[in-house]
Every structure is written in C-alpha cells, then in structure tokens.
Amino acid sequence: MENGLNIQNLDKLAHLSIKRGVALQKGQNLLITAPIESLPLVRKICEHAYKEGAGIVTPLFTDSDITLSRFKYAPNESFDVAANWLYNGMGEAFDNNTARMAIAGDDPMLLAEMDPEKVSRANKANAIAYKPARERITEFKINWNIISWPGKAWAKRVFPDVSEQDAIKKLGDAIFHASRVSSDDPVAEWDNHNKNLREKTDWLNAMNFDSLHYDGPGTSLEIGLADDHDWMGGASESQNGIICNPNIPSEEVFTTPHALKVNGKVCSTKPLSYQGTLIEDIQVEFKDGKIIDARSSKGENVLLKVLDSDEGSRRLGEVALVPHSSPISQLGITFYNTLFDENAASHIALGQCYSKCFKSKKNLTTDEIKSRGGNSSMIHIDWMIGSGKINVNGKDQNGNLVPIFKQGEWCN
C-alpha cells in the first residue's frame, strides 16, 4: 500500500495513462506536470513510458506550500508576472511533437484564504503567459492526457469527517473507480467505453442539429451550434495523427457552440471550484451568445471577475452531454475538481473553444474558427448544468425538435 492506496490499481492507472490516455509512441518525448505529492504515481508513469519506448520523460513539479508562500510574502508587483519562458518552452516542445500529461491532485481550495485581488491578478498573468502552450492543447496539435492523484488536502476536502489516511484511501478508490482501473483489464474496459461514446457522437453528427434546447428547474436555454461543428468524445485523433484519451475519467460527448447564438437562462447543478473559491448556485442569462446577467449565492465576486477576463469570457466555448447515470454521478461525491465533477453532469464551458470540434479540424486559422462561430478567450471554465430533471432536445435542420435527453438520460 502507498499511503493506504491500492498499489496494483495505482500501477494500472499509470499503465492506462500511457497506453490509452496519452497513447505515447515509441521515441516520443513526454512532458509531465504534477504536484510533488504525486511522485509515487509519476514514477510509475515514467516506468511505463520508458517500457513503451519513450525518448525522454521530463516531470515538472509544483508544491502547495511554495505556492502559498508567494501569496503570503511576495511583493505586490509579483502578481502581475508569470513564467513566460516556461510556457514558451512548452510551446516549443509541443511543436516538436512532445506529448503532454498533467496530474491533478492539489487542494481545490488552496487559495481560498488568500487576497482575492492578488489571486485574480496572478491568474490573469498566468493565463496570458500560458497562451503558447494552451493554444497547442486546445487546437489538439499533440496527444495529451489528464489523470488524478488523491492529494491529502484534496482528500480531506472531499471527506472531512474521516482521518487523513482514510480520506486519501477513499478518494483514491473513487479515482480508481471513476477512471475504470478497478477492473482486471482497464485497457480493454476503455476500448469498450470509447466504442460506446463513439456511437453517441456518430449519431449526433449524423443528426447535425442546428441547436440544443435545455429545460428544467431554473433552466430554459437554447444553445446554437457552430457551423461545421463536430461532436467528439472518448478517444480522439490529435493533429499529429495519434489517437488518445485526453481526459481520464471521461463520460462526456462535446462540441463547439456558436458564440453568437446562445439565448435564455440556466443555473448550475453542482458547485464550481475555481482557483481556490467555491462558486455555488450560479444563475446566468444569455442574449445573442453573451451573458448579460450573472449571480451566485456564493463566490459571486469571483464569478464576475472571471466574466470580465476578456472579450470572449462571457460567451461559450464548449457544450457537453453527460448522462445522470454516469459512474461518477452515481458515486454521489462532489469532488471540487472539474475533471470529475464535469463528468457527473452535462455542462457548458465559458471561454475558449476547441478548434478540434469542427469537421475540417486541421489547421484552421483564428479567422476561420471565428467565422464558424467558435469563441476565443484566455479562459476555459466548465460548470455543470445537468441533472436527473433536465430534458434536452435537438432542433434539426428542418426545425423539428428531436429528444436527446429525458430526465438526464439518453433517449437513443
């Protein structure tokens, strides 16, 4: 056991992340970003990467205490700068076909007690600096993958009423279950899961809906879909020709909404944990694609700051469908982590669109993406709008409404 974790499942998660997650190719380099706590998992990932013939694996670690020391002791001007050189280097690495893996595991509320103005400034500076790396990921130019490690602070946040070791074990077991590595053959399990998700995306692409219509408690929303949009989910082919699973876990199928064609009201069905702040009971109204009114019962100041990040931050960059019966939803756990919570419910994302979600997905220019209705922004923030009480209908090209979800479940 490693901190109470099942070592066999930890090894299977590492193996899955290399074989089906990032789908590392022989001779390909790999860049990993991870919290220092996750070193046992990173070591196993490196082991499996080199067994697959990796060129060189480069891990970059973060530490919560070091992050906090900046907000406690750094001079004021520190919060308007970021490590541009690092992200420029990452962009260069991706241009040279280096694969990308990120391990999530930090306390989602790490900065909750820090000065919100400093947090906001630091986030904005980092978002601007991260652009060279972010663009190559959102454009799916390289194969990439995100998995998770049950960090102790995160574990105690999710399971506050048990000991630290028990919390780590419980969160670890939840991660293993959600990531489908508790089975005897996780790779085969994911091959079958990818097949099922592909059937959903094939149907949605064949229907070629003009818009989606959401109805439920506090929600009456029409989301127009981008011209030439393409539904994706599960395993997808990156621009370098490698088929990978960017997110583990993943229960969603998703596409690009039209940035100018969203109208109506919608409310969140799960809390959004954003940069150390918990934002609850989000309610927004869209007109012609733009949020014209926004409020929340908790974290509203942070929400409003996010919406004013740039010109595209009040518009949608992603719409995703997730059944209420997904394994993550059935766990009944709020993870305070978007990777998991977004796969428990249908969701939308403010900000940057994925340029891969177009039928002509390779090498689209910024102007071409915009002309199809794709949004541009320095942010991409998912929040959950699905539940067992939400119905979704698609409007086809003849104006007919076709049921997609009834009470949170697939109709087809």
Image (spheres, grey):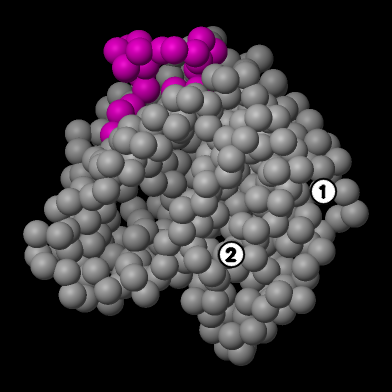
Residue at the spot x=49%, y=63% of the render?
Answer: 35
Residue at the spot x=45%, y=41% of the render?
Answer: 348
**Most common SS among magenta residues:** loop
Query: Can you say which quadrant of the picture contains the C terminus?
Result: top right
Q: Is residue 193 visible?
A: no
Q: Nearer the viewer, residue 226 or 174?
A: 174
Seen in the picture, residue 360 relative to 184 is either above or below; the reply is above
Q: Residues within 10 Å of mark 2 (few under 14, many from 20)?
A: some
Badge 1 is on which residue? 186
Q: Nearer the viewer, residue 338 or 246?
A: 246
365 falls in the magenta region: yes
Badge 2 is on which residue? 39
- The location of residue 271, given as percent across then percent down, is 44, 62
Q: Residues within 10 Å of mark 1 (few under 14, many from 20)?
A: some
Tell me the amino acid under the disc marked 1: Pro
Dot 2: element? helix
User: Where are the magenta residues, as a range?
Assistant: 354-377
Give residue 295's quadrant in the image. bottom left
Q: Nearer the viewer, residue 191 or 48?
A: 48
Residue at the spot x=20%, y=34% of the render?
Answer: 311
Say left or right for 23 vs 90.
Answer: right
Residue at the spot x=37%, y=22% of the render?
Answer: 374
Query: Can you say which quadrant of the picture contains the N terminus?
Result: bottom right
Cα distance between the residues tagged 2 and 1: 22 Å
Seen in the picture, residue 210 relative to 65 is either above or below; the reply is above
Q: Earlier in the sequence, mark 2 or mark 1?
A: 2
- The location of residue 250, given as percent across then percent down, is 64, 45
Observer-side mark, 2 or 1, equals 2
Q: Is residue 206 visible?
A: yes
- The location of residue 222, given as percent across then percent down, is 42, 32
Q: Nearer the viewer, residue 28 or 123?
A: 28
- The location of residue 232, given as percent across then percent down, is 60, 27
